[in-house]
Image: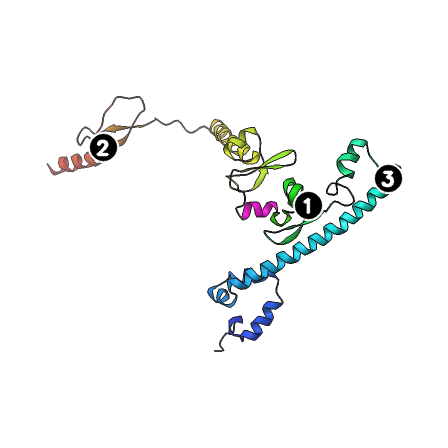
Amino acid sequence: MASKTTIFDLHVEILDIVLTHLDYESIAAFRQTCPLAVAMVPLTKIMRLRQQIRASLLEQEHADHQRRQEAFTNQRRWAVVFPQSVQGTAANTTNEFNNIHRNRITRAERLNCYACLKHLPRECFVKGQVTGSRSLGHRDGHRRFCKACGVKKGIWEKGAIIKDGGCALVVCKVCNLLGRVDAEGKKIGICSVCLAASQETPLDAERQVTSHPSPSQPGSRATRCLRCWAIDHTAVPAGSTESRVCLSCEAACRVGKNGT
């Protein structure tokens, strides 16, 4: 029978060549497969790759911010010469046109997440991660993380309330997802969907019992056995004061009678 050959049977030089053609995510996933892969890809290599990717993303972000800053400056000059080209009311002009991060032309629609090291759409971040000091090219931009990393990597604790512009989100303690939350859910750290489901469950059970009544059976309660004085479920009708012996004592009495 022919012996099986695995990737770990290859020479180290060949394995190094294979790994050089893989991206960071593939190498990190490969390292988690088995102890041999851990030995093949040391942690120092993963950390070095991560630092290189972070540095590359930061460099690209600063260059992108520089280009947008130049475009924003040119646009403002154009607006001074041709004010009729600026659309919208004065309020919109003040709030949007005069801000590089809100301007419809220079606003970044994709940003870097420095937790998962991905270039993601703007919708993948809460508003606080794409404005202020963590906006494109600003001093805390390297601390920006997406919604998925905030939940999966434990950056946000379960039950934490997250502001996303005008709405409030919560890392739900039930479904462990980021969802909308109302005033009642904020107190217990549960999203609106799970809170509504938990409130509907008792009502559904009550409706089911009402629509499908159980057959008429006498209730029962636990009573003390008159022979051994132990508590045993004797199937005595609920509310009755009748006393009986437990099943074990009943069997023992029956054996005694048969013996006599």
Q: Pick the quarter of the image with the C terminus.
A: top left
Q: Which residues are magenta?
A: 145-152
Q: Is residue 18 above or below residue 1?
A: above
Query: What residue is disc 2 on?
Result: 246
Q: Nearer the viewer, residue 42 or 17?
A: 42
Identify which amino acid the numbered label 2 is placed on. Answer: Cys
Q: Mark 1 vs mark 2: which is more N-terminal? A: 1
Residue 136, position as x, y percentages in the image: 69, 47
> For the residue labelled by badge 3, is the local secondary structure a helix, a strand or a loop?
helix
Q: Residue furthest bottom?
A: 1
Residue 164, position as x, y percentages in the image: 63, 37
Q: Which mark is residue 80?
A: 3
> Local crowd at mark 2 within 10 Å, few (<14), some, or many (≥20)?
many
Q: Nearer the viewer, residue 160 or 208?
A: 160
> For the residue labelled by badge 2, is the local secondary structure a helix, a strand or a loop?
loop
Identify which amino acid the numbered label 1 is placed on. Answer: Arg
| Camera-nearest label, 1 or 2 | 1
Residue 238, quarter of picture: top left
The residues bearing labels 3 and 1 have C-alpha atoms spaced at a distance of 30 Å
Q: Decide if residue 94 is in sight here.
A: yes
Query: What residue is disc 1 on?
Result: 122
Q: Residue at x 54, y 43 (%)?
A: 156
Q: Which mark is residue 155?
A: none
